[in-house]
Amino acid sequence: MISETTPRTQASTTELSPQEALVCLLIASARADGSVSPHEANQIEHVAAAMRLFGGTSHETRRSIFTAAAERIRDQGIETVVRAAAAAIPNELESTTFAVAVDLMLTGGRMTENEQRFADELRGALNVDGETAAKIVDVLAVKNAG
């Protein structure tokens, strides 16, 4: 499901920063339905800018992080990057990352089958327990219903 891109280069051993890992996971979440719309890209940028994880970063720094994340996905493939990015998310941000990703996927009011499958895979990769994940999805479904 996640392997929508074919890696064009060998996987890099460069570790992801927590910021780049979050952006990679958000881009992958937005792509779960096939592509990243301009609205989704804008939403990712605004959400990241508002997070404490990006506190004190300039617009240029955030742009650089977004560019690096997009290039990593293009070069290494979504599946490889999602695994590495999930591992790079600090434990205290695993549920937060899952919630932000689900919120992004629910922007249209509901998740497609591919998005639901990706959300399940992401929940597992981020070690978010099923009960917490269900609560997150329920609340965000209400938030995005209108």
Image: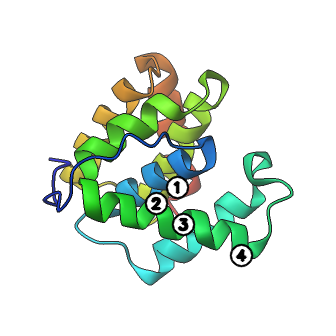
Q: Earlier in the sequence, mark 1 or mark 4?
A: 1
Which quadrant of the view contains residue 32? bottom left
Q: Which mark is residue 108?
A: none
Q: How is the image coloured?
A: rainbow
Report the Cα–Cα distance between label 4 and label 3: 10 Å
Label 3 Cα neighbours within 10 Å, binned few <14 / some 14-19 / many ≥20? many
Q: Mark 1 or 2, which is nearer the eye?
A: 2
Q: Earlier in the sequence, mark 2 or mark 4?
A: 4
Q: Residues within 10 Å of mark 1 (few under 14, many from 20)?
A: many
In the image, residue 130 sits, relative to residue 69, either above or below, namely: above
Q: Which mark is residue 23?
A: 1
Name the front one of labels 1 and 4: 4
Q: Of helix, strand and loop, which one carries label 4? A: helix
Residue 90, percent from left and from top = 61, 28
Determine the CA span between mark 1 and mark 4. Answer: 15 Å
Q: Amino acid at mark 3?
A: Phe
The residue located at (17%, 62%) in the rendering is: 8
- Circle 2 packing at 10 Å, graded few (<14), some (14-19), many (20+), is many
Residues at circles 1 and 3 in contact by the CB criterion of under 8 Å: yes
Residue 15, how many percent across, how many down? 49, 39
Q: Which residue is mark 2?
A: 69
Q: Earlier in the sequence, mark 1 or mark 2?
A: 1
The type of residue carrying mark 2 is Ala
In the picture, measured across the screen, residue 139 lies left or right of residue 122, that is: right
Image marks 1 and 2: residues in contact by CB distance under 8 Å: yes
Q: Secondary structure at mark 2?
A: helix
Vertical order, 113 against 117 (above or below):
below
Q: Which mark is residue 60?
A: 4
Residue located at (45% from left, 17% from top):
129
Residue that carries the numbered disc 3 in the rendered image? 66
